[in-house]
């Protein structure tokens, strides 16, 4: 018996849960057993009953002892136990392998194993060991949420049996399902789902938490988690999917929503990507399965972040570092966007390295014509990868492209001595081609993009590449002009300018006087695009009005500032599309972020 696998304990009553026989009115409570019921519920283990008895006196006695409400799907009658136990497990959408049945009658235990070969069984003398094992379990469910969810399921089961058909029951249940894309904020619950789900886990890829994090950070992967509710209650996060190149990597759901049709509904919503089903699953899904019409049937699209409430011909590209990433977190309808943010490389030679040069204007210009041969040459360096030069900005039809130029003010530029290809990396004050700087990289005294440099790496870079320094303001403006002239002619280009207000708490040498650097760059860009059609300069200085608007650097602002940016971005997108295709998160979010900042300021007035 593996106690760690137990999700449900089914109890016999006479001579098991209590000493004596209820029909003779000679039963005495066993304190340890009652305590075990309460404690197991707090640990997330649910309890049920399968007893040959009259229900009324049993229920009255358990109510008297204060434990009746801790049982679900209780089966108290005079029918054989084997089929009843099988029905309990089926009605609770569980696997027999996660169930323990305790009974003093050996014949009942054998009958249970006959109907449910994988079930765990034990006699009442296991109680003491079980109590100790449950007490030693880590974590828990202090609010008994799991028990409450099965209470809801029990109520639904009773009502389903009163309906003429299962679809009639589902339709009157008012099932509401939402897809959300802020997966990193819910990574703990998603990881738990991946590791625990079996019956409705179609892909069965048991990722580590770090692998999951890297997957969610990838620009190539579309992912979402699923929440559900109905008239009986809230179910919380019950599903997760992730796909790349129209092929599902993860597709899984909690068994507590089995029978609601949510798996097929989500598969329809995300466009039936390729799915390789691994092992056995409890339901069938696919294009040929009947369409799910009872989910969200009584509502419009509402607040569903993934809902396609826009026309497929209008797309938006957001291309830049952390500022655009932060803004994007406050915009809904994310699947209308292509996002090219700073990312962590997954390629073998550069795994774990942070790649931010892809949004430097020089690399964007290079992406227009760079050859595969030159890309492969760059990939010989462990701080580069093959995805550093995406050309979607030129090839795809976008209604709007948002570009941030913050990386141009900071990164140093390097060029291959014999080939001319360029890449941007690291703070510009510390050229990797200068031997006097090598110890700073070897000892991680300067920014290394999470790479552990070796001396031979720096020797190779010094031998094969020349350092060009940081781009001048005029060159940045020229690069932006090239980009503008080579994107689709009907696309609106929005350029985010840098902050011109001094960040007084700066301690980094490479960031000294950065606000004046931004002033010069902004001036050059303003001049370059003066009265230029289809170009909008987004001036952050209209929003950054006090030192209190900064977070930890001149490039990082408080979340409420990013919310306001997102609000303006949404307005620009909708104006360009001439319809409401994008939504911002609730205004209550802004109120919450503002209040949260004020509270922090009161608690830590000296910052």
Image: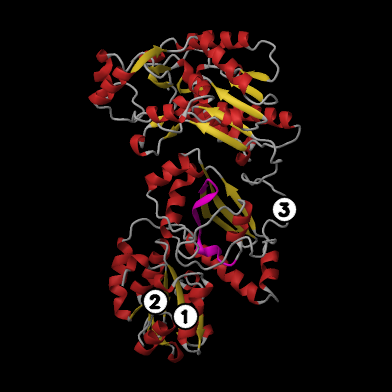
Task: State if disc 2 and disc 1 touch (CB < 8 Å).
Answer: yes
Please indicate, yes or no, whether residue 563 appears anywhere in the rendered image. Answer: no
Query: Rounded to the nearest whole Å, what is the CA distance between mark 1 and mark 2?
Result: 10 Å
Q: Is residue 583 left or right of residue 252?
A: right
The quarter of the picture where the N terminus appears is bottom left
Front of the two marks 1 and 2 = 2
Quarter-of-image position of residue 455: top left
Q: Is residue 529 above or below residue 352?
A: above
Q: Is residue 15 above or below residue 517?
A: below
Question: Residue 497 magenta-drawn?
Answer: no
Given residues 66 and 401, the one toward you in this image is 401
Residue identifier under label 1 = 85
Residue 332: mark in rendering? none
Q: Which residues are magenta?
A: 243-259
Residue 436 percent across, percent down from the top left = 25, 13
Please indicate, yes or no, whether residue 361 appears anywhere in the rendered image. Answer: yes
Residue identifier under label 2 = 119
Disc with the residue nearer the chain's start (1 vs 3): 1
Query: Rounded to the nearest whole Å, what is the CA distance between mark 3 and mark 2?
Result: 42 Å
Quarter-of-image position of residue 581: top right
């Amino acid at each position: 018996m593996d106690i760690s696998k137990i999700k449900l304990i089914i109890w016999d009553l006479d001579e098991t849960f209590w000493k004596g026989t209820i029909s003779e009115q000679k039963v005495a409570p066993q304190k340890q057993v009652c305590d075990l019921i309460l404690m197991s519920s707090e640990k997330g283990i649910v309890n049920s009953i399968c007893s040959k008895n009259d229900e009324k006196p049993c229920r009255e006695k358990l109510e008297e002892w204060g434990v009746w409400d801790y049982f679900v799907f209780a089966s108290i009658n005079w029918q054989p136990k084997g089929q009843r136990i099988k029905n309990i497990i089926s009605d609770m959408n569980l696997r027999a392998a996660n169930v323990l049945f305790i009974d003093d009658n050996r014949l009942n235990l054998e009958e249970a194993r006959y109907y449910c070969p994988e079930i765990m069984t034990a006699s009442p003398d296991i109680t003491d060991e079980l109590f100790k094992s449950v007490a030693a379990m880590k974590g828990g469910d202090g609010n008994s949420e799991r028990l409450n969810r099965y209470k809801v399921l029990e109520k639904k089961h009773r009502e389903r049996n009163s309906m003429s058909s299962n679809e009639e029951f589902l339709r009157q249940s008012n099932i509401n399902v939402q897809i959300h894309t802020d997966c990193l904020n819910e990574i703990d619950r998603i990881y738990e789902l991946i590791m625990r789900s079996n019956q409705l886990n179609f892909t069965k890829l048991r990722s580590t938490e770090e692998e999951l994090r890297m997957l969610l950070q990838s620009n190539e992967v579309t992912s979402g988690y699923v929440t559900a509710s109905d008239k009986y209650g809230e179910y919380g996060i019950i599903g997760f999917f992730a796909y790349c190149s129209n092929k599902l990597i993860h597709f899984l759901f909690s068994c507590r929503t089995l029978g609601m049709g949510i798996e097929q509904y989500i598969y329809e919503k995300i466009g039936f990507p390729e799915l390789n089903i691994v092992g056995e699953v409890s339901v069938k899904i696919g294009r040929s399965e009947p369409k799910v019409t009872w989910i969200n049937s009584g509502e419009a699209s509402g607040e569903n972040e993934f809902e396609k409430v826009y026309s497929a011909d209008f797309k938006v590209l957001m291309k830049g570092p952390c500022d655009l990433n932060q803004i994007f977190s406050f915009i809904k309808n994310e699947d209308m966007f292509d996002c090219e943010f700073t990312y962590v490389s997954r390629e073998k030679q550069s795994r774990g390295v942070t790649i931010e040069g892809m949004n430097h204007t020089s690399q964007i210009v290079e992406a227009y014509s760079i050859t595969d041969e030159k890309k492969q040459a760059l990939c010989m360096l462990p701080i580069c990868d093959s995805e550093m030069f995406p050309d979607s900005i030129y090839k795809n039809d976008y209604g709007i492209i948002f570009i941030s130029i913050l990386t141009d003010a900071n990164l140093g530029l390097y060029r291959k001595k014999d080939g001319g290809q360029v890449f941007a990396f690291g703070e510009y004050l510390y050229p990797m081609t200068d031997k006097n700087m090598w110890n700073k990289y070897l000892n991680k005294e300067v920014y290394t993009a999470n790479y552990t440099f070796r001396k031979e790496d720096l020797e190779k870079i010094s031998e094969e590449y020349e350092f060009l320094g940081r781009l001048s303001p005029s060159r940045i403006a020229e690069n932006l002009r090239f980009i503008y002239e080579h994107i689709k002619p009907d696309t609106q280009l929005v350029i985010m300018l840098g902050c011109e207000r001094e960040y007084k708490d700066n301690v980094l040498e490479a960031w000294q006087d950065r606000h004046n650097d931004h002033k010069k760059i902004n001036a050059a860009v303003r001049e370059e695009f003066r009265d230029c059609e289809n170009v909008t300069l987004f001036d952050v200085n209209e929003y950054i009005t006090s030192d209190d608007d900064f977070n930890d650097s001149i490039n990082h602002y408080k979340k409420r500032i990013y919310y306001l940016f997102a609000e303006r971005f949404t307005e620009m997108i909708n104006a360009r599309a001439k319809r409401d295709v994008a939504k911002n998160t609730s205004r209550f979010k802004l109120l919450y972020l503002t209040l949260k900042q004020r509270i922090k300021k009161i608690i830590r007035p000296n910052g």
